[in-house]
Image: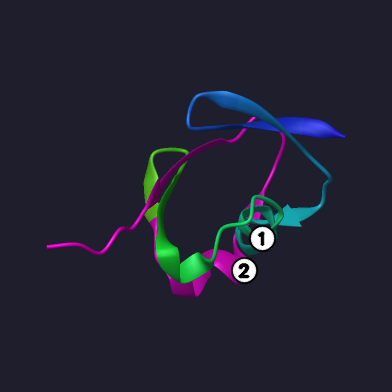
C-alpha cells in the first residue's frame, strides 16, 4: 500500500484506485464534496473514471447546506 496526500495529510491507499473509490473508502459521497486533484477541479461525473496514483494531492471540501 502507498499514499496520497488528502487535505495536507498522508492517507494510505490500495492501488489501483479511482477518485470515486477513494472517496467511498473515506466515507464520503461523491455528490457531497468538491474535489481538486493535483490542482485541477474535478466534476463529480468524472470521479469514477479518474485514476489516482501514489503521491497525488487531493483537496476535498464537503458541501454543507445552510442558510
In the image: residue 57, left or right of residue 63: right
Image point (60%, 35%), residue name = 56
As drawn, is 9 to the left or to the right of 40? Answer: right
Give the residue at the far right of this rendering: 1
For mark 2, give the secondary structure. helix
Q: In the rendered view of the protein, which quadrant contains the C terminus? A: bottom left
CA gap, disc 2 to disc 1?
Answer: 14 Å
Residue of label 2 = 49
Q: Position of residue 55 (x, y in %)?
A: 65, 29
Q: Residue at x 62, y 68 (%)?
A: 49
Tags 2 and 1 in contact by the CB under 8 Å rule? no
Range drawn in magenta: 42-67
Q: Residues within 10 Å of mark 1 (few under 14, many from 20)?
A: few
**In the rendered image, which quarter is residue 14 located in?**
top right
Which of the two discs, 2 and 1, labels the residue nearer the N terminus?
1
Secondary structure under the numbered disc 1 in the rendered image: helix
Q: Quadrant of the N terminus?
A: top right
At 66% from the left and 60% from the top, the residue drawn is 24
Residue matched to label 1: 24
Label 2 Cα crowd, 10 Å radius (few <14 / some 14-19 / many 20+): few
Amino acid at each position: 500500500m502507498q499514499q496520497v496526500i488528502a487535505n495536507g495529510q498522508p492517507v494510505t491507499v490500495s492501488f489501483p484506485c479511482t477518485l470515486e473509490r477513494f472517496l467511498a473508502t473515506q466515507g464520503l459521497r461523491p455528490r457531497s464534496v468538491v474535489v481538486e486533484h493535483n490542482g485541477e477541479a474535478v466534476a463529480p461525473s468524472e470521479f469514477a473514471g479518474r485514476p489516482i496514483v501514489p503521491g497525488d494531492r487531493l483537496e476535498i471540501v464537503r458541501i454543507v447546506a445552510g442558510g
